[in-house]
Image (cartoon, grey):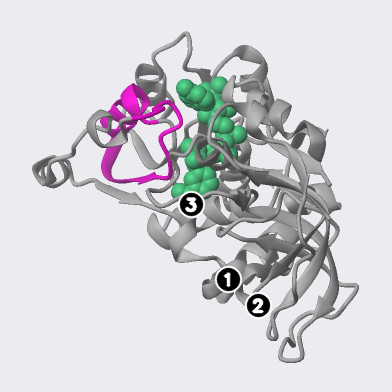
Amino acid sequence: MKGIVLERFGGPEVLEVKDWPEPACPPDGYVIGLKAIGVNFADTVERRGLYRRNQALPYPLGKEASGVVMERGPLAHEFQPGDAVIVVKFDNGCYAQRVSARPDQVLRPPQGLSFHEMAAFGTSYGTAWFAMHELARVRPGESALIQAAAGGVGTAAVSLAASFGCAPVVGTAGGPQKCAFVESLGADACIDYSTRDFKEIVRDLTGGRGIDYCLESVGGQVYEDSLAVLAPLGRLVIIGFSSIRDNYAERIARLHPLTLFQRSISVAGLNADNIQFQANRAVWERLVAHAEEHRIRPRVGAVYPLERAGAAHTAIESRQTMGKVILEP
Ligand SMILES: NC(=O)c1ccc[n+]([C@@H]2O[C@H](COP(=O)([O-])OP(=O)(O)OC[C@H]3O[C@@H](n4cnc5c(N)ncnc54)[C@H](OP(=O)(O)O)[C@@H]3O)[C@@H](O)[C@H]2O)c1
């Protein structure tokens, strides 16, 4: 079987397709024949060896994909061979033709999506939904600010906030083309934060009140400015630090509890790796029902063959992508 096995850390050139053993079916799980693979920003961090402390080489990369159940173990009951499924596997292995998965790593996709769209759904929509509903408890009519809104999670967050009735939904993105794309997803406005200070514009758009809910993934000054525009009772959920390449512990600003108290704001963090969408199946089902009801389709911005995974990583790291990047096995 073909797959991308990380044998050393480094630049996109370390992503080489190799022969890898066929996956064995777990007694309570599945073997999935993959049709499309979702590329995450986290894969680029992992490729550089900075995702977690104990990354022991070699191992196959890839945290999510879509495909068809080929085999199921004698104790697996939820899916049948032939079913189309989403795989979210934070212990990796999805940059491949086939993957084994435990029952808690296989998810029901919304009906009507293509395999490319299914591979774009799991991590991005799951993260955006859990942040907005399980942590920030957003209500219809509240304002939402989505940072890096043209990206994989960003596009999901804009679609989910707009379809849930948030108002206004404000995105930020780097460049006019990305901003036009974000507005086409249902955002009331998108600010090019590479050329403009978004704080004043956000205050104007919310009548001076500030933002009720912010999804923050960029870090650095964008994080500081996001905090600054929160309204009283506003909630900010941190999901990443895309602008910070290393020395995370030193470069991520500390937040004093007094700040939270004085301004009546909340800051939360979400790590899909440890919450696991599958362990919260009822929440996942609410997301799938919402996506089906509102006919939400993930935006696929680019598709590469698996052999060109390095080019896909380069595109993401150089901020050229809009929507989700997909690999074809
Ligand atoms: N916590 C979780 O469970 C979880 C789950 C999924 C993703 N995430 C995080 O959410 C963020 C988005 O993930 P994604 O996979 O959807 O990626 P993405 O949004 O497709 O790509 C990252 C975006 O970040 C922006 N960015 C700002 N500064 C950057 C820099 N110095 N280098 C590169 N990009 C920069 C770029 O958009 P502009 O050019 O528009 O600024 C870029 O398109 C990442 O930080 C990721 O780690 C977290």
Q: Are marks 1 and 2 in contact (CB under 8 Å)?
A: yes
- In the rendered image, which residue does mark 3 sit on? 56
Upstream in sequence: badge 1 or badge 2 = 2
Q: Is residue 283 above or below residue 230?
A: below
Residue at position x 47%, y 17% in the image: 193
Residue 229 falls within the magenta-colored stretch: yes
Residue at position x 61%, y 56% in the image: 92
Upstream in sequence: badge 2 or badge 3 = 3
Q: Are marks 3 and 1 in contact (CB under 8 Å)?
A: no
**In front: mark 3 or mark 1?**
3
Compared across the picture, whether 212 is left or right of 283 comes to: left
Mark sitting on residue 103: 2
Span highlighted in magenta in the image: 219-246
Q: Is residue 164 above or below residue 10?
A: below
Amino acid at pointer 2? Pro
Secondary element under disc 1, as helix, strand or loop, is helix
Amino acid at pointer 1? Gln
Q: Label 2 crowding class (10 Å Cα cut-off): few <14, some 14-19, many 20+?
A: many
